[in-house]
Amino acid sequence: MHEQSIVTYLLSEAVSKAGKEKASRILSIKLVVGELTGIEKDSVIFYFGFLSKKTIAEGATLEFEYTKAQLRCRECDIIFPKDRSDFICPKCNKKVVEIVGGRELYIESMEVI
């Protein structure tokens, strides 16, 4: 259900940015979504369709670009993809990592007229 508030924010940002460019309509929005966000694509599309009614974004298409989770080992400082669920560094086998990627959620670009 958190998608509704996220879409409300993203829609507000898109309309604001389009307004600054003096656009009359948003045709498409490209979103970058990290795999750790827990965002459900179908829910985002549903809420966007509902919330964008009677705005310049009504009818716009959404494009999703997904980013993989990236971890950094605090012991040996390498960055590696989160391929396993155990969060163990593939170089030093320590379990002292921090998340450095995969939580992204932003508008990458928009097509407007």
Image (cartoon, rainbow, N blue to C red):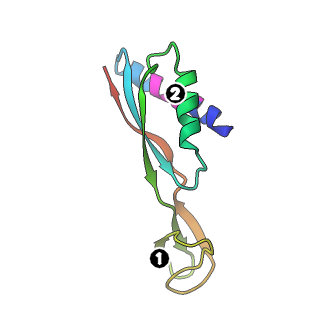
Q: Position of residue 6 (x, y in %)?
A: 60, 36
Is residue 11 inside the magenta stretch? Answer: yes
Q: In front of the other: label 2 or label 1?
A: 2
Q: How far apart are the alpha carbons under marks 2 and 1?
A: 37 Å
The kind of residue on which mark 1 rests is: Ile
Is residue 106 inside the magenta stretch? Answer: no
In the rendered view, does 28 fall on the left or right side of 70? left
For the residue carrying disc 1, how many other residues have a C-alpha within 10 Å: few (<14), some (14-19), or many (20+)?
A: some
In the rendered view, does 102 fall on the left or right side of 17? right
Quarter of the image that includes the N terminus:
top right
The kind of residue on which mark 2 rests is: Leu
Stretch in magenta? 8-15
Which residue is pictured at 47% across the width and 60% down the height? Answer: 68
In the rendered view, does 98 fall on the left or right side of 77? right
Q: Say which element carries label 2.
A: helix
Do the CB atoms of the residues marked 2 and 1 lie less than 8 Å apart?
Answer: no
Image disc number at residue 61: none
Q: Position of residue 4 (x, y in %)?
A: 63, 32
